[in-house]
Image: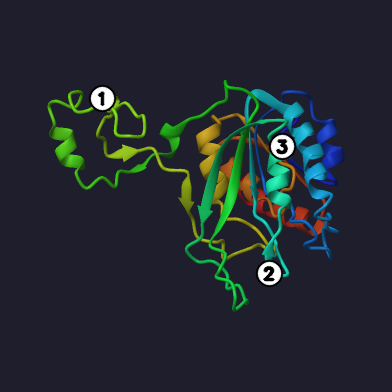
Amino acid sequence: MNTNYFECGDCAELLRLLPDASVDLVMTSPPYAERRKDTYGGIAEADYPEWIAGIAKEIHRVLKNSGSFVLNIKENVVDGRRSTYVLESVLRIAQIFRWTDTYVWVKPNPFPTGNRKRLKDGFEYCFWFTKSKGYKFFPEQVLVPSANKDLEAEKRRKNKGEHPVTNGSGMNMSRRVATDMVRPSNVLTLPVDSTNHEHPASFPVALPTFFIKAMTEEGDVVLDPFAGSGTTLFAAQQLGRDWIGFEIIPRYTEIAQERLAEIV
């Protein structure tokens, strides 16, 4: 299968051209319902769950059995109320995939809301779906410095296995090891990308970088069917992964190809 290419077109059609079980990770952020009508046309909220489920079925087909699908999306606010189409979409996708976890991307520098009756939107969801129980996962590739104030004391303990075996959460404390680097939580604090590359909703390179590190190995194939300005593909290239990108807007395709040409 050819990799490391970016194609302009409708991903619903382009996905059908990919072989079965040929991709290791799909990391993407589709357009919101009835937003960006001047560019993407906009999918009606009532139609969105079924539309995204159709895309998810093709993603399920092209993913390897050990693959993952990460969906970055958040609800619109319409007339002062949160729309429900994202939750409905997640439930539809969960009928196709295994809903493995939900990550929260916290933005320390969110954009002003412009609404006096609402606070700034300071986070977005990243829904993690897998195809099977045998999915790839490499937490050791995304370790972070420990924030345990008693870390040094824990390291010196001689009876690590003798304290109570549970802490109320069901975790076996006798297996706990005090180390300088630990697994992160599923809350990711990453600033909004200030250089949006002419795209109105580009996420920071650090976001796909995290998931690519955690869910793939060098040489694996990363796909973004709603690639925008190519941020996911840019991260994949930097990390030594192969990549495929689809984007329906020609101008964004050009921008992505220019960015990728700088590092290829």
Q: Is residue 148 above or below residue 203?
A: above
Mark in front: 3 vs 2: 2
Q: Which is more toward the observer, 254 or 261?
A: 254
Furthest toward the front, the residue is 168
What residue is at 51 percent from the left and 29 percent from the top?
Answer: 137
The residue under label 3 is which amino acid type?
Ile
**Residue under circle 1?**
174
Residue 133 percent location from the top left of the image: 58, 22
Residue 8 percent location from the top left of the image: 82, 48
- Residue 239 visible in rendering: no
By what rule are the colours in the image chosen? rainbow
The first of marks 2 and 1 along the sequence is: 2
Tag shown at residue 213: none
Dot 3 falls on a residue whose secondary structure is helix
Total marks shown come to 3
Tag shown at residue 93: 3
- Residue 66 visible in rendering: yes
Q: Badge 1: few (under 14), some or many (20 or more) residues near its Cα, within 10 Å?
A: some
Residue 242 percent location from the top left of the image: 64, 34
What residue is at 82 percent from the left and 38 percent from the top?
Answer: 54
- Report whether 207 appears left or right of 18: left
The first of marks 3 and 2 along the sequence is: 2
- Contact between marks 3 and 1 (CB within 8 A): the answer is no
Mark in front: 2 vs 1: 2
Q: Is residue 130 above or below residue 201?
A: above
**Residue under circle 2?**
80
Dot 2 falls on a residue whose secondary structure is loop
Q: Badge 3: few (under 14), some or many (20 or more) residues near its Cα, within 10 Å?
A: many
Residue 76 percent location from the top left of the image: 70, 61
Q: Which is more toward the observer, 221 or 5?
A: 221
The residue under label 2 is which amino acid type?
Gly
The residue under label 1 is which amino acid type?
Ser
